[in-house]
Amino acid sequence: MRTKHAGITGQFCNGMMKVVKRTLNIVQVRFVAGAVLALGLGLHTAMGAQLPVGLGTSGDFTILAKSGISSVPNCTLVGDIGVSPIASTAITGFSLVMDASTQFSRSAQVNGKVYAANYGVPTPTKMTTAVSAMEAAYTDAAGRALPDAAELGSGNIGGLTITNGLYKWSTGVTIPNDVTLSGGPNDVWIFQIAGDVTMASGKKILLSGGAQAKNIFWQVGGGAGVTIGTTAHFEGVILSLKAIHFLTGSSFNGRLLAQSAVTLDQNAGTPPDLADLSLTKTVNNATPNMGANVIFTITVTNSGPN
């Protein structure tokens, strides 16, 4: 968890404001008592050695696929899902209900919107753009050079604790036991996998030290794609050249971005945390007289992404 700020702006009614102190942790603002303060804060945090893979508008989706998304009910999904260039007929098992706008549909299994390439304008363009962004993200992840390790565990990473970095395999990767990704909230993991990813039933990807699922990228180039076993739990963004299969009762915290199909079976899925911010305020004079100087200290803590 970090406490930082990147900047501050302010606007007063009947008063004046100026920033009188900046530190890594605190912004202090001095203003005339009686003023009304409205703050706009821009936050950033330090990055790790690897920059995150840019997802573009494909990052607007919890699940995005080119050739279909199927569900064996009931799934519980948070966020938008969509397909393109294939039509909505390739979204099966969701009992879709078209919105009056014709731009998206709804499903009791999706806490979000469902999009397809054949829906009303502007959805076709939206979906084409998102798929192009997904393909670009795959290319970005696959093209990262100078890995920190190659062929880690000879492709078997079960039971390992893996720190942040770039990892490359010329084969597939298996996860027969729990694996831990250990690092800070801004650390980035990129896994370049030429083959498939197979995770055993009941196993978990565990995050420690504040590691964030949004900063974990699994680029998978194998012909079978990704298969997550029953009741297993997966963390991170999957960028798969082929299909992604989540077997019965498995779950994920991340995004499933497939250049083929995504198949689901009574799964739960959520996108990575979008923010986890908190503000605390202290004041050096709780009962000032009109015209007196008052110092408010605003501390912004970012426990989430950048």
Image: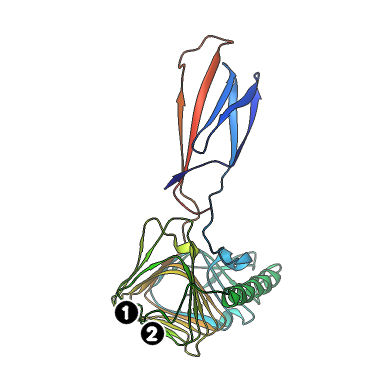
Amino acid under disc 1: Thr
Which residue appears farthest toward the bottom when viewing the image? Answer: 223
Residue at screen point 47% across, 16% down: 285
Q: Say which element carries label 1.
A: loop
Residue drawn where x is 62% and y is 78% of the image: 84
Residue at (39%, 76%) from the top-left corner?
73
The residue labelled by disc 1 is 230
Residues at marks 1 and 2 touching, judged by CB atoms closer than 8 Å: no
* Label 2 Cα crowd, 10 Å radius (few <14 / some 14-19 / many 20+): few
Q: Residue 275 location, x and y as percent?
A: 49, 51
Q: Position of residue 96 (x, y in %)?
A: 51, 73
For badge 2, the amino acid type reads: Ser
Residue 182 x %, y % = 38, 62
Q: Quadrant of residue 144?
A: bottom right
Q: Spatial distance from mark 1 to mark 2, Cα to Cα?
A: 24 Å
**Is residue 289 shown above or below 26?**
above
The location of residue 33, given as percent across then percent down, is: 56, 16
The residue that mark 2 highlights is 154
Asked if residue 141 shows in the view, the reply is yes
Badge 1, how many Cα within 10 Å: few under 14, some, many 20+?
many
Q: Secondary structure at mark 2?
A: helix
The quarter of the picture where residue 120 lies is bottom right
Q: How is the image coloured?
A: rainbow
Residue 94 shown left or right of residue 32 in the figure: left
**Res 271 visible:** no
Residue 290, label in figure: none
Numbered disc total: 2
240 over 234 or under it: above or below: below
Taking the image as shown, residue 254 lies to the left or right of residue 114, namely left
